Amino acid sequence: MQVLFATLPPYWLATILLVVFAIELRIFPVAGGDSPIALVLPTLALALELSGFFGQVVISEFSCVLEQPFVTSARMRGMSDLGVRFRHVLRHAALPGITLSGWALGKLLSGAVLVEAVFARQGLGGVLVTATSTRDVPVVSGVILVSAGLFVLTSTVVDLAYGIVDPRIKLT
Amino acid sequence: MSSSEVLGGAGAFPHLLQTLARVRTVPLRVYVAVTVVGFFLAAAIAPKWLETHDPLAIDLTASLQAPSIAHWLGTDQSGRDLYSRIVEGAGQSLSIGLGATALSLFLALVLGVTAGLADGAVDTVLSRLFDVLFALPTLFLALLFVAVFGTTVLTEIIAVGLGTAPGYARMIRGQVLTVKSAGYVEAAKALGHPYVRIVRRHILPNAVSPLTAMMTLGVGQAIIWASGLAFLGLGVAPPAPEWGALLNAGRNYVIYAWWLEIMPGLAVVVFALSVTVLGRYLGDRLEGKS
Amino acid sequence: MLHLVQPEAQLLTVDSLRVCFARNVAEGTAVRGVSFSLAPGRCLAIVGESGSGKSVTARVLVGLAGHRARVHARRLNFAGTDLTGLDDRAWRRIRGKDIGFVLQDALVSLDPLRPVGKEIGEGLRLHRAIASREELERQVIGLLKLVGVQDAEIKALQLPHQLSGGQCQRALIAAALALDPRLLIADEPTTALDVTVQAQVLGLLEETKARGKALILISHDLAVVSRMADEVLVMRQGEVIERGSADQIFRDPQHAYTRQLLDAVPSGRPRGSRLSSSPAPRLLRQHGRPPEQSAARSSQIVLKATDLVKRFRGPDGILRTVVNGVSFELRSGETLGLVGESGSGKSTTARMVLALDLPDQGAVLLQGKAWTTLTERQRRARRRSISVIYQDPLSSFDPRWTVGRILSDSLLGDAETRPERQERVAELLYLVGLSPAFLNRRPLELSGGQRQRVAIARAIAPRPKVIVCDEPVSALDVSIQAQILDLLGDLKAQLGVSYLFISHDLGVVRHLSDRVMVMRDGRVVESGDTEAIFAEPQHDYTRDLLAAVPTLRGRQPQAHRD
Amino acid sequence: MSPSVVRSLSVPLGRPRRRKRNAASIGLALAVLPQIGVMTAALAQEGLADSAKRGGIIRYGHFQEPPCLFGGWVQQWYLQRQYSDNLVARTQDGQIVPWLATSWTISDDKKTYTFEIKPNVKFTDGTPVDAQAIADNINGWLSESPDLRNPTAAPYLTDSFESASAIAPLTLRITLRTPFQPLVNVLAQSSQGILSPTELKRGLAANCEKPVGSGPFIVEKWNHGKDVIFRRNPDYNSAPATAKHQGPAYVDGIDWKFFPDQTVRYGALLTGESDAAYDIPAVAWKDANSRFTVLRHITGGTPLRLALYSARPPFDDVLVRQAFAYAADRKAAIESSFLGSLPFEGNGALSQSSPEYIRELGQSYPYDLGKANQLLDRAGWTARNAEGIRLKNGKPLLVRISYSSSFLKPDGEQALQVIQQQAKVAGFDVRLQPTNQADFFAGRNLGPNDYEVALLYWVAHGAEIFRISWKPDLNGQLNRFNPSRYQDLALWDVIQKAEQSFDGAERAALYQQAERKLVENAPAVGFAVLDVTLAAQPNLKDIWLDRGSVGEPVFYDAYFTGKK
């Protein structure tokens, strides 16, 4: 399932979501402007693919951690299966996912370029496409700066999150 | 373990058993994946064998037909058979996927290995560069390249290759660093082997072998990226039935002729899924996890 | 023993326990008909090598043999409860509360992301044995104190990696003892611990037993068992091959395998005597060079280290002196044992001798010529005269390479033509007691002992003068360890090499070494002839080390009777 | 000046007119009077009806977003129509009627036009709309100032225009060097909407962002990439004679959204998120007609046509041009690709809604493979290579079609692929060169050696477009708007004669002479008519498409029925 999600082209998914949920079922607005509900479909289109990647990583880590002696140890203290998964394993399994967040940002922005096109939304992605096709150097540099800034920001957040989840890492 | 086993008397038999066991445990999904990948490879190499219609032949009387026995996946506006077009497009899409991945990995290898092996300033400069490029959206470099050099299969390959290279370069650098500090590298050093030999015989092969799996994963992703470019109108010129182009064209009809959008998308997904499954399986096998 | 217990007062009864793993009945039957019983205040030791089924047996007792395991037993009774029909909920009530379990390797058996105190308190919380958070804290600290952890209040808040190995193991035991279970199962509780720490942990377990708890101790180390056990169960390939009281087993083993295990323990055995039942030393056919010298020590100094100092900058940025003024000489044909606990600087010394790290001060001379002061390029040609055997051979092999390739690669510059190389490789395999069938195996397809043999073959391939052995047997089962030690002894005799032999295991060092050097905190605290040191240790630390070594019952640790 | 590929122009009536033009214009002015009279008389009643019509904001889904809210591209005209007024308007049947000018006279030498300006009209910034303001606008269009120059008006008027001036506060005079009959048509196009001269002084950038006119709506805010918000001009008092009512608009405003994706654009209409949507996709044409109020306007000027590069091989040879025209079943290609929603146009010179259009030319060059082969053989393209592509002197018959994917709907791209496939049988190696909007404007794939065919259109009222398309390169001045690079001085002579003729019949005859010549020589081959379609929810009434230029939707008269 996660593998499937990971291979879904976001724009394709976006188109299908649009037709099914907005045009046929009319659960969500097609374009919807600024209302938060209008963000549901584009977000979903982007998130599903990423969730696939994260899912893969987290699940493989999860099964890996489940084999660890400290998990057995916790079981031997009488902890239930679910308890073990929540109290011990989840935290470990989240670590590689957190590490991936920085990488996901680049992917997210790329996906956003396409999904924005589908949902007729204007965002950084659209600006990027226009700027590159018109070779608008100031805007291109701006976009580079913004994404670099976002990257730095994400990295910082990732580091912080990592520090919280894994207290072994001390920020220096 | 008994001492006789240590002496290797029973060596051959368990080995055979192991091999047998391995063959038996190839999961079904791998067979399916092999079949799918095989089908698309065949389509890429000899599309004519698999096509039911001429993919470019226009039949204005059969415009926009839903999937049927005559047209398995339906027809487009000009009455062209969608199944045959997807088959025909496999060649371009796969060459974009493979070409872009190969290029990307090549670039990544050169840069990543250089950074990984070099200490100090070179590594610092290169890995900062990877970080900066990595921070950019994958499509960004590709967009820029296509915008400047136009859209042909070749530029598409280069564009996607460039776009995905920084990520791989980072991974390869990390891999080289890991392998560099591996015990067997030190063992070879302790044996007095020249550095070049160690790099060639130990570091490179071991740093690169995980890439085999990555390569297969990358092909699927590259096709998705390339179709993304096509989706933005920066794909290969029509009438080439490249998958991305089909997707892009199909989007306009999706409300009234869903198959034009769904089917090429499924082709992309099924292919990417299959190579991914295959890639992971091979990767696991290579790492001896099977 | 102080506690006399009536048979009917047995706490645990296991009758005809069979465990198989569903996948493959032929290979997967891990336990075949094990029976035993245990009374409170008694200690049962299950002894056996890896794969003998001892751990599976223990895990059955807490219902955690694995989801693929199929368990059959005629009787499985704990404190009047039939364990065979329990569902998961019922098992959970027993685990931790009635049966405590201590896993081996404490560092990975404690969740690395959670404070130690939380782990200890987990059992209390789960079984709702405490009323408030304050009480929980109090109890956790009490438990830590019980297991002899200093500064319990601080340690409770720390993460496992901030604690030493011994402290972790104690914390783990504390966690197992939290609910004061009637049965404590300890699976290899002292593996990977330094001897002094091992002694402390064993002491802790003894106290537990003295408090009237039943104890199941699982170990491959007979010396450990010897100290603790009232009864011993010797297992091999899933079967109990011998059981009896500890006294009987150690004094008068009935089964040949038990004897073999006992013989394999080097401590207290004559130096140089064979530990394994492997074939007697074979004559070298042709190792390119006839053994010029016998095992006799010559006066030629092959390796000389002078005042080695090495400092490393830690992750906190503080410079630490890891090796501080170490000097020694190694003569041709001699074995120099280097003993010390983890962190004492043994391995760093070894790396400097190998010139893999260069000393910050001092120098190493190899065969009388400059070594560490050369450039790597100059050193390269002479590297062939010194080689190394690691503790973990697996990581020192390129996982993609076959044994044949690994060995022929190590012959670089020695055997030029292909047939020559093939012949040499075959000879090396023969020397280390491996059949030619191994040529095409990859490291992952080898057992630990086989790997170490390949590592030895690789080390002797370039015909070195000196082999640095860095803990070459500490990851091996005792009987395999015996084989490898014998092999090392044989090779020394035949090839005339010198060993710098590093180990934390005093028994092993004593068995093999001509001279011994004891290291602590980067300094050599004592050195001299092996027997002199073991007989009359001068330094307090050496004495502590020796005292901590568990010995087999019936063998005098200090004396040599043969 | 931004390269404006797409233009339009209003055209005088196709029917022959009486020679006395001033009389005609007075007649027009009179003709408007009864309407005003009716309005005044029925004011009370209208007022009641008006209050029922009041209110609501029209959510309109448009196609593309231009870089500026006014300018030469039709995408800009659509917007400008909402906030500015023109000097004159054009009716559906091609008459020029009053707007800001209540009446006008033309001097006997046809070189002086005098316009009387409607009193009491103000730009929405408060500046009065007087003769001076309008003269400033017009002089600006034809000046060299990049802030003011009008990329649509300039190519029409540069050769004839002399000056514009206010001879009285409300009397405007335009003086020409040579007579130019289509002047009033040009003035009726939305791109010639009058903007506040006060605001124009802010410079191009500020005006692009928030232009100020005297129109029924005021540009409130342009959210780039998203929409333009228009607010009702409550003081509006200058509706054109073509409007259905006078006074301010009924609705409170327009939310003019940009939905480049047709699925989203039409989808939003389907779900009721939009009240009106531009450009109905071909696949949805039938469906739209059953659900919505559908408006359609076929634009005048050139049709969507294939301009064949006639200045070098292979299309320097008229035989090859004709062969290319015969080689593909363009009609079937258009009809199938557009699923019958868009008519084929075989006349490459002029669109069928132009008054001078010659109907029988619409079917010229029908699909005839035999003829195509024959012509190519005669032209010397006799050899063929392995793929069946014709060769001459070893060179393949390569035809590269440059087009912008942003001007051509996806359906049109399909049609091009059909042509590509069919022309191959005759031996043409047709390659498609899609180019994105920005690159296309930047001239990508449009250089002298970049294409054999360019797919373009230029919207106007009628044949006055010939001046733009076919003016030869005179005095070393390149006509950038002639992608065929076709140079025909005799044709140019005819075109100029037509422009200077105020005799409707004579002018039409001259234009038609040029038209025939163009079709015969085939420097441009017809493809499809260009249409403007709009679908509106049934509860949104009285939107109409302006016939003054490109068929801009006019929301001024629109109102919602029922609850809004």
Image (cartoon, coloured by chain):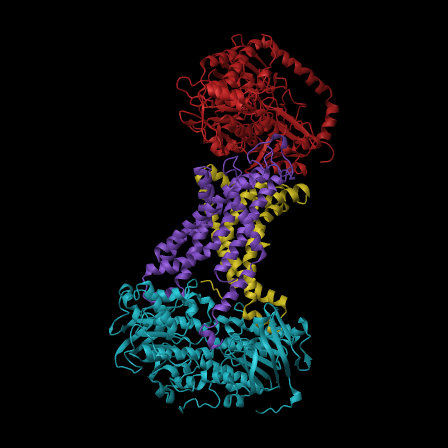
Chain colours: A yellow, B purple, C cyan, D red
How far from the left and from the top, in percent, is residue D178? 48, 12
Is residue B273 in sight in this rendering? no
User: Could you say which quadrant of the image residue C516 lies in?
Assistant: bottom left
User: Could you say which quadrant of the image residue C556 lies in?
Assistant: bottom left
**Left or right position of C83 against D149:** right
Is residue C472 in sight in this rendering? yes
How far from the left and from the top, in percent, is residue C295? 31, 82
Query: Is D92 placed above or below D533 here?
Result: above
Query: Is D205 placed above or below D505 here?
Result: below
How far from the left and from the top, in percent, is residue A17? 63, 45
**Left or right position of B180 against D149:** left
Q: Nearer the viewer, residue B266 or C279?
A: C279
Q: Nearer the viewer, residue C269 or D54?
A: C269
Residue ID at (74%, 24%): D44
Q: Nearer the viewer, residue C70 or A80?
A: C70
Query: Is B106 placed above or below D72 here?
Result: below
